[in-house]
Amino acid sequence: MQMPDDMILSVEGLRVGFGRGAATVTALRDVSFTLGRGRTLALVGESGSGKSVTSLALMGLLPPSGRILSGRLNFRGRDGTVTDLTRLGAAGYRRLRGPGLSMIFQEPMSSLNPLFTIGDQIGEMLLLHEDVTAAERNRRVIEMLELVEIPGAAARAKTYPHELSGGMRQRVMIAMGLICNPDLLIADEPTTALDVTIQAQILDLMRRLQKELGMSILFITHDMGVVAEMADYVAVMYAGAVVEQAGVMDLFDHTRHPYTRGLLASIPRDDLAADERLVPIPGAVPSLTALPPGCAFAPRCSHAQPECRQPVALEKKAQGHLSACIFDFAGAA
């Protein structure tokens, strides 16, 4: 497979469905994006836009009712070999998860096993993927807990998840995800349940670890403030499709899709005047079983025209900037 040397991931025309036969519901519609080695791509959108389904498809963790209908998920491993993840079986994915792909889930309390110590849970990754002694495993676990800035790491390794705060549990999840030094870390809204101070600490930690370990990050969020702080590139998703994609500063300075403009307009600002109000996006994300014809965002869009009822492809509007809209706002008011 042809893939630029500086790319670690290329998603091409990914379609994911749930159900079987005529009852199949398409949850992802021709999702495409790329991620460079050592860079961060943010997947952004409201709940129900398809962000988490995309991550589960990449990890080979779709539920039994879900399956990849078409597309390619090209991943470049440490040896330079490019693999289409859609062709991997269960055994191939088990070998890849950990050293190749790793994931931090949204809610650590439901992702950690309450019956085992955090040291045992982190060390299990080494049991699965590396041939190390028990002493070496314990040493690596403590080192990783220290790396994610958990105080008293040796003692904390013997504790259970319920004995830790939310921020500490999230750090444990990061340690678990990084113990095998993955090439690509998928972080699915890892700071959603945390207060602002702890969120800032976790984001700072992830940026530092990315720089030290040289990994790539696929960061899934609905928080545009986090996007500005973490991402190099952004792919905005709506109703199972990418509607805009650009470099992070280009996206904020030259927003080209009405949906992205709506997301940015609804962000709370420090400079909001007393008589000003946030501008919410009206309506809700449509049901995947009843998508409108053409542009899925058209029923909520103040700029919609009759021609928006026709299919709209993700097209290049400027260098490195794609948008799925018949208009090109380019940051206009």
Image (cartoon, rainbow, N blue to C red):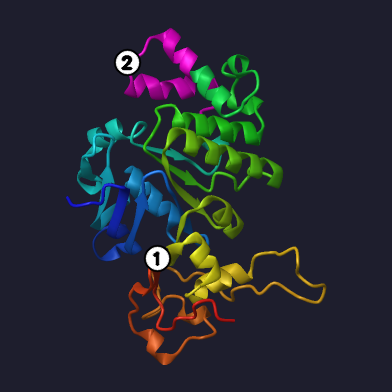
Tell me: residue 62, above or below residue 326.
above
Residue ranking furthest to the right: 274
Left or right: 27 with respect to 42? Answer: left
Badge 1, how many Cα within 10 Å: few under 14, some, many 20+?
many
Residue 164's x, y, as percent? 65, 28
Q: Residue at x 36, y 51 (%)?
A: 35
Left or right: 274 with respect to 1? Answer: right
Type of amino acid under label 2: Asp
Q: In this orientation, which residue lies closer to the viewer: 284 or 245?
A: 245
Q: Is residue 268 magenta?
A: no
Tell me: residue 266, above or below residue 219.
below
Would you say residue 115 is visible in this rendering? no
Assign a secondary structure to mark 2: loop
Residue 222's x, y, as percent? 55, 58
The kind of secondary structure the magenta stretch mainly shows is helix
Assign a secondary structure to mark 1: strand
Type of amino acid under label 1: Val
The magenta region covers 113-140
Judging by the rendered image, the residue that carries numbered circle 2 is 131
Q: Is residue 124 magenta?
A: yes
Q: Residue at x 76, y 75 (%)?
A: 276
Residue 251's x, y, as percent? 50, 66
Q: Residue at x 56, y 75 (%)?
A: 283
Judging by the rendered image, the residue that carries numbered circle 1 is 242
Residue ranking furthest to the left: 1
Tell me: residue 228, above or below residue 244.
above
Tally the marks. 2
Q: Quadrant of residue 291?
A: bottom left
Residue 194's x, y, as percent? 65, 43
Q: Quadrant of residue 133?
A: top left
Would you say residue 254 is visible in this rendering? yes
